[in-house]
Image (cartoon, rainbow, N blue to C red):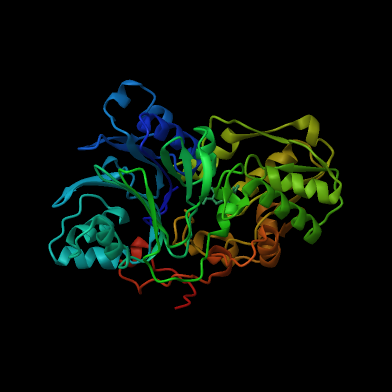
């Protein structure tokens, strides 16, 4: 994949006050691997100084050697898994970022994407700041280092009051761990307890692995400060806004065993499938998912429609998510590497294929062909989300608008392109109602084009593509 927008899909995990802090963080990152596969890192604190180990590569590769943990002593640690887009795929950009500043050392791990990063960076550089990475996250460090306030908490608040966009942040100093979720609550973040330790994770599946008790989700706009006395302070230092958690976390990104935004992801996806069956029923013999992300929705579709569920495509679990492949050529090849049809199941059948989304359409096209080549008589594509027509600026990796097939093609054109007999997308209303959270708005920017946090006017060169695309901006 060769996107040029510098934004990131990531996962964060932190442990405060546990003798095995870095080992537990390693396990937590393992459970969050689906949120980013390019690089990972852990910074630990032994109470007087910070220690880091971070590299390009998967968690198991970077932390597969027990020797590494000798370099990560202490009772607190934060970790990060990252998949970033092109231009930033280098060792120096691996998180957590760790720096020494006038008040000591600090490390930060970030999930999300700032929309005014370029403006702030230009401003900071004009005042003499020198950046070592190309990550948004470093801007936060610079802002807190130059803050005129006194305490660390005030410095962080001061810095975050200047940034706009999506962030779940974990800060670690010699003595404290601080977690912050942005006021819109775009990305999930939860709090757990393990004996006397506090644990913070992007998704609850990471708490399950280390057998930490799920305490609650960290609220939009909340800052949690863990201090030496074992206490936890909760603050709401930002201007309150209507929360807009990312609905695409439910559609695709989060793990189905996670509980996010007050709901289990698996059940939510199953409900999307049921609703999809109600909206786009079809006479067919079998329902098959595009594994893994299409599985719960396909089960829901099968239950609602009464058509039997089969695993007509088998996934090789040693291959990462298709999008994670760095080059277009590999990604195209990737569908075949990842999926293989079960001919005996598909032969002569009218097949409903369920996937979570169509982005460029290349995956669906290959899958439809694969299912048909395996002998299917008819192939009906059903998608458990509305057409993805707009790029995400809040931390989900989507290509620019031109590459999103539904931004410029009608339903029947897309159907023709993917060579399906029919195509149906879940409606926006169906999606929101199925996820069914009372009193909560969602960010549906990728489907609706309405962006809950407005971004500044173009500041980048057009070829960088960040804000050079069409979008509807609701200031
Ligand atoms: P495409 O070939 O571009 O249409 O890609 C569609 C496939 O990518 C679907 O099977 C989705 O499960 C998957 N997908 C959708 N959004 C993302 C994303 N942000 N990161 C990785 N994979 C994605």
Q: Is residue 107 left or right of residue 471?
A: left
Check the image and report above or below for 4 versus 89. below
Residue at (42% x, 61% y) in the render:
182
- Corner quadrant of residue 393: bottom left
Residue at (76% x, 57% y) in the render:
275
Residue 138 x %, y %: 26, 54
Residue 333 visible from this viewpoint: no
Question: In this view of the protein, which residue sits in the foreground, 130 or 417?
Answer: 130
Question: In this view of the protein, which residue sits in the foreground, 119 or 284?
Answer: 119
- Seen as rendered, the residue at the extreme bottom is 475
Q: Is residue 126 left or right of residue 465?
A: left
Residue 83 visible from this viewpoint: yes
Check the image and report above or below for 452 versus 82. below
Residue 321 x %, y %: 53, 41
Q: Is residue 332 left or right of residue 145?
A: right
Residue 8 x %, y %: 41, 51
Q: Is residue 274 left or right of residue 19?
A: right
Residue at (48% x, 70% y) in the render:
452
Residue 164 x %, y %: 37, 66
Q: How many marks?
A: 0
Question: In this view of the protein, which residue sits in the foreground, 256 or 473?
Answer: 256
Q: Quadrant of the C terminus?
A: bottom left
Question: In this view of the protein, which residue sits in the foreground, 218 or 7?
Answer: 218
Residue at (30% x, 63% y) in the render:
157
């Amino acid at each position: 994949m060769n996107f040029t927008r510098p934004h990131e899909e990531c996962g964060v995990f932190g442990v405060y006050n546990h003798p095995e802090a870095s080992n537990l963080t390693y396990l937590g990152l393992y459970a969050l691997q689906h949120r980013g596969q390019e690089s990972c890192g852990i910074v630990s604190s032994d109470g007087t100084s910070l220690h880091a180990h971070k590299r390009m590569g998967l968690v198991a590769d970077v932390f597969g050697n027990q020797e590494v943990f000798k370099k990560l002593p202490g009772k607190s640690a934060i970790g990060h898994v990252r998949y970033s887009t092109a231009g930033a795929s280098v060792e120096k950009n691996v998180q957590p970022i760790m720096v020494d500043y006038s008040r000591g050392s600090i490390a930060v791990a970030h999930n999300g994407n700032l929309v005014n990063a370029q403006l702030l960076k230009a401003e900071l550089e004009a005042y003499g700041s020198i950046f070592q990475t190309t990550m948004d996250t470093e801007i936060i460090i610079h802002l807190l280092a130059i803050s005129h306030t006194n305490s660390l908490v005030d410095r962080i608040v001061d810095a975050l009051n200047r940034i706009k966009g999506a962030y779940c942040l974990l800060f670690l100093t010699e003595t404290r761990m601080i977690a912050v979720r942005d006021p819109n609550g775009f990305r999930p973040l939860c709090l757990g307890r393990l004996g006397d330790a506090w644990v913070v994770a992007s998704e609850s599946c990471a708490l399950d692995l280390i057998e930490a008790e799920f305490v609650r989700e960290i609220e939009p706009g909340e800052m949690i400060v863990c201090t030496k006395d074992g206490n936890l302070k909760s603050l709401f230092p930002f201007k309150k806004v209507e929360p807009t958690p990312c609905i695409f976390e439910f559609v695709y990104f989060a793990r189905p065993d996670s509980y996010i935004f007050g709901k289990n992801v698996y059940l939510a996806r199953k409900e999307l499938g049921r609703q999809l069956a109600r909206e786009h029923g079809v006479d067919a013999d079998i329902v098959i998912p595009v594994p893994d992300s299409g599985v719960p929705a396909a089960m829901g579709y099968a239950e609602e429609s009464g058509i039997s569920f089969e695993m007509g495509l088998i996934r090789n679990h040693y291959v990462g998510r298709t999008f994670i492949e760095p080059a277009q050529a590999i990604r195209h090849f990737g569908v075949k590497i990842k999926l293989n049809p079960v001919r005996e199941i598909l032969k002569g059948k009218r097949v409903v294929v369920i996937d979570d989304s169509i982005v460029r359409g290349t995956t669906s096209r290959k899958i439809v062909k694969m299912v048909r080549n395996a002998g299917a008589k008819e192939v009906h594509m059903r998608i458990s989300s509305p057409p993805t027509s707009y790029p995400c600026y809040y931390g989900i990796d989507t290509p620019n608008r031109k590459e999103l097939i539904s931004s410029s093609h009608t339903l029947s054109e897309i159907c023709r392109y993917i060579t399906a007999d029919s195509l149906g997308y879940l409606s926006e209303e169906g999606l929101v109602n199925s996820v069914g959270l009372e009193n909560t708005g969602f960010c549906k920017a990728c489907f609706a084009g309405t962006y809950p946090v407005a971004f500044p006017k173009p500041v980048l060169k057009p070829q960088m593509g960040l804000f050079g695309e069409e979008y509807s901006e609701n200031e």
